Image (tube, rainbow, N blue to C red):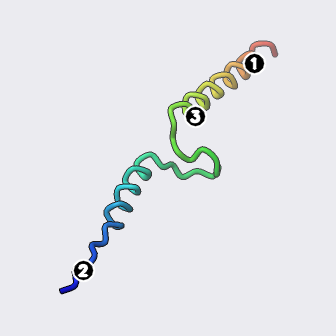
Amino acid sequence: MIKKPINQNDSFDLELLNSIESNYVFENNPINRLNNKNTVSKTSFEKKIKKLENLKKEINS
């Protein structure tokens, strides 16, 4: 009697997909598609700086 091999690749693939897809973000930019706390804080910080610069321009003009 020949023992049939068990295919466990599906369970490993499913675990991998579940671990990746939870934080995956679709954007136009191909870089930094995974949402990290560092990238989010940097972008919000950059937005704040731009807003402050615009406010300075409005005040000075």
Q: Mark 1 points at which residue?
A: 58
Does 28 sit above or below residue 7?
A: above
Mark 1, mark 2: which one is toward the viewer?
Answer: 2
Query: Image point 43% across, 52% down: which residue?
Result: 21
Whichever of callouts 1 and 2 sits on the residue coming sooner in the sequence is: 2
For label 3, the SS is: helix
Whichever of callouts 3 and 1 sits on the residue coming sooner in the sequence is: 3
Q: Name the residue under label 2.
A: 4
Amino acid type, mark 3: Thr
Quadrant that contains the C terminus: top right
Mark 3, mark 1: which one is toward the viewer?
Answer: 3
Number of the label disc, if any, that sits on residue 6: none
Q: Which residue lies furthest to the front in this view?
A: 1
In the image, 28: left or right of 26? Answer: right
* Mark 2: few/some/many CA within 10 Å (<14, 14-19, 20+): few
Amino acid type, mark 2: Lys
Q: Residue furthest left?
A: 1
Q: Which of 60 and 5 is in front in this view?
A: 5
* Mark 1: few/some/many CA within 10 Å (<14, 14-19, 20+): few
For label 2, the SS is: loop
Does 46 sit above or below residue 15?
A: above
Instruction: Provide residue 3's location: percent of width, then percent of height.
Output: 22, 80
Quadrant that contains the N terminus: bottom left
Query: Image point 31% across, 72% down: which residue?
Result: 7
Query: Image point 39% across, 50% down: which residue?
Result: 19
Amino acid type, mark 1: Glu
Figure quadrant of residue 12 = bottom left
Instruction: Provide residue 10's location: percent of width, then percent of height.
Output: 34, 67
Mark 3, mark 2: which one is toward the viewer?
Answer: 2
The reply to whether dot 3 and dot 1 touch (C-beta < 8 Å) is: no
For label 1, the SS is: helix
Q: Name the residue under label 3.
A: 39
